[in-house]
Amino acid sequence: MVAGLLASLGLHVEIGWADALGALTFAQRLVGVLFLLAGVVQGLALPAVVDHWGRRQVRFSGALVLVGVLMALATSTLLLFLWLQEHESIATRWLFLGLWLWSLWALHVLIREKVWRGIPHPKKFAAGVTVTAVLTGVSLGYSILYQPIAAPLHFVLRADFGVPQTDADSPYLHVPLTLSAKNTGGIPVYLVVDDYTVFGSKAKYDGAGDAMKEWKSDDQDDGWWSAEAEAFESGVESEIIASGQFQGPGSTLDAGEEFRMQRVVTLPKGTAYETLNAVLQFTFLRQDRGKLDDEFSYEKRSWIKSEGRYYCPPDTCGEHVIYHGGIRYNTNLIDVTRKPRYVAAFWSPEEAPDVFISSFNFKKYKSESLYDIYGNLDEDEMDREAERYGLGQVSVNSEVSVKGLLKQARS
């Protein structure tokens, strides 16, 4: 009996300590505190075991042991239920199962001995404990499970071109670009990876107005198509002329916070571009669902051999800046029933950023090709983890006429 209570006490402390000190929301910290208090009760039940099966000097020692056992049964049942949702191969599943079987045995022993006989009005006591436990469970379940799913996110993003600057002797045109992002929702987020890109578009004038047919490929096997078409623009091509990071991977954007950046795009006065299109985008992670390791913000360069396992020959998979780190769910009940999860992000000025969350530990992978990593990932798991941790993406774009910019510059 003492051995089982000690194991349950250690499990309650392990789960509760991380949440009580590190959870973001009050409800999640309260869950951690409740688990620590349950551990205290089970600690008090240890000497009660010795007293109940010894001299019985304390009238309620048997009832205290019963409360400790019921806590162990409730926690082990919950942990087994959470583990069964995904059936991951973790060593602690045997601890959950062993503790659950022990709880059933201990409950059988205590019921057989009718340990509640020392309690005045035992039926009222049992009813009060049951009602309190149910109400507490419903309240906490709403706070830590439903609210993080239902709480809305909202961002205001802007990408604005300013008045261009030049002079008569300069062959260049400087176009100011202002980028901003404000978190107008109630949930703070991590910016896992962010990017701004300015595209220059070229096109030919089609006087016949037949260019509407160019919205898709004529090749039946190609399948290429575009969501835009214009009758008098033919052969539209876009090129990247500027790209960079915004706030930076691993940074945070709290509720009500705004981040603003100003850049200058340089163009030759004789440019052939018809329009400029600025795109600001970032992938975010909800802080009420997950917490990124501090090491995530330290980048690795895929083309540097000295950085070992991150090396990727440029002729094989291009050049990327890589960000990698662990992530934990904001309720430790989930973490102890799952394998560790990791976030990996890739950034390059010539490609769209990419992010995934999975149980795949990128650090331990020895292949020289980043693309081999994707062959080892479970797409269903990545989709499930993206939903669990609130991984999402937002973007905004702004397009201006280059002729209009040149006219502004001349005036």
Image: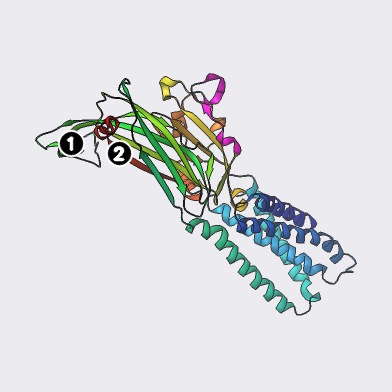
Is 379 positioned to the left or the right of 15 in the image?
left
Q: Tell me what residue is drawn at x 51 percent, y 23 percent.
A: 311
First-in-chain label (1 vs 2): 1
User: Which residues are drawn in magenta?
Assistant: 294-310
The mark closer to the camera, 1 or 2, is: 2
Q: Tell me what residue is drawn at x 85 percent, y 61 percent.
A: 50
Is 114 positioned to the left or the right of 82 in the image?
right
* Residue 381 against residue 233 in the figure, above or below: below
- Quarter occupied by residue 54: bottom right
Instruction: Give the x, y percent position of residue 365.
Output: 54, 29
Front residue of this view, candidates 173 and 385:
173
Residue projecting furthest to the left? 208
In magenta segment, residue 297: yes
Residue type of the residue flagged with mark 2 = Glu
Query: Is disc 2 placed on a helix, strand or loop?
Result: strand
Residue ID for mark 2: 399
Residue ID for mark 1: 214
Work out how far the residue at label 1 is from the one at label 2, CA to CA, in angstroms.
Answer: 21 Å
